[in-house]
Image: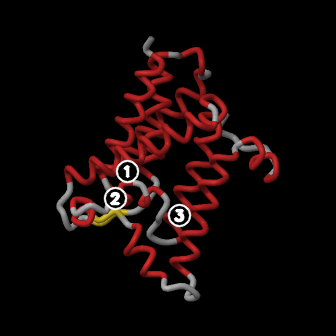
Amino acid sequence: MFTRTESFRDFIRFYPVISFIIVIHILLYLLTALPIFPNQYLLERLAGVNLYIVNGEYWRLVTPIFMHAGFAHMLFNSFSLVLFGPALEQLLGRTKFILVYLGTGIAANVATLLLEPLTYTHVGSSGAIFGLFGFYISIILFRKAMLSRENSQTILTIAIIAVLMTFFQSNINVSAHLFGMLSGFLIGAAAYRR
């Protein structure tokens, strides 16, 4: 389930939403990294800045989900999405997957707005990726038959490690990680508790 054996072409065909999100990650990274574009402009316009959000720049609740602070940040989040997103994209379908991904990412950014100072600035898709973990946890709790025992153990182990690492690494948006996961769990619980 979490082992990728598809060819590059098959991956794009089977998981078009994840492929498109990763293309956006790479393009935005290149536009902010290469000297052929006023790269600081994109970061200034698309990063989540709490002060600007409360002053009406509400797109900043969405755009940080696709922006990253450097190559390693972009690569790690994109790799996480490649590993853990495909099963949910197949399970939910394209539209519902997009709604879960964006919904949890936005929830993570709203939590950041409410819990962090007005001067706080953030980028990264980890809130949405933690949202996927939260959604998986709801499946494990409410629809155990949908995942094998091994896959459930893998998800729970990685989710626990990810939450622990949130508190031990610097420059991590703790609010986004925790509330992204919580929102993913709540969305999954609403879908699967019935």
What's under tag 3, amino acid-wise? Answer: Met
Q: Position of residue 95 (x, y in %)?
A: 59, 37
Q: Give the structural element (helix, strand or loop) at label 1.
A: helix
Label 1–label 2 contact, CB within 8 A: yes
Which residue is label 3 attached to? 74
Q: Position of residue 32 (x, y in %)?
A: 51, 77
Q: Give the structural element (helix, strand or loop) at label 3.
A: helix
| Outermost residue to the top | 194
Q: Give the structural element (helix, strand or loop) at label 2.
A: loop
Which residue is label 1 attached to? 165
What's under tag 2, amino acid-wise? Answer: Ile
Which residue is label 2 attached to? 172
User: In this rendering, does residue 127 appear at all?
Assistant: yes
Residue drawn at the location 64% of the way across and 46% of the way down: 17
What's under tag 1, amino acid-wise? Answer: Met
Separation (CA) of disc 3 from disc 2 = 14 Å
Q: Is residue 99 left or right of residue 4?
A: left
User: In this rendering, does residue 170 appear at all?
Assistant: no
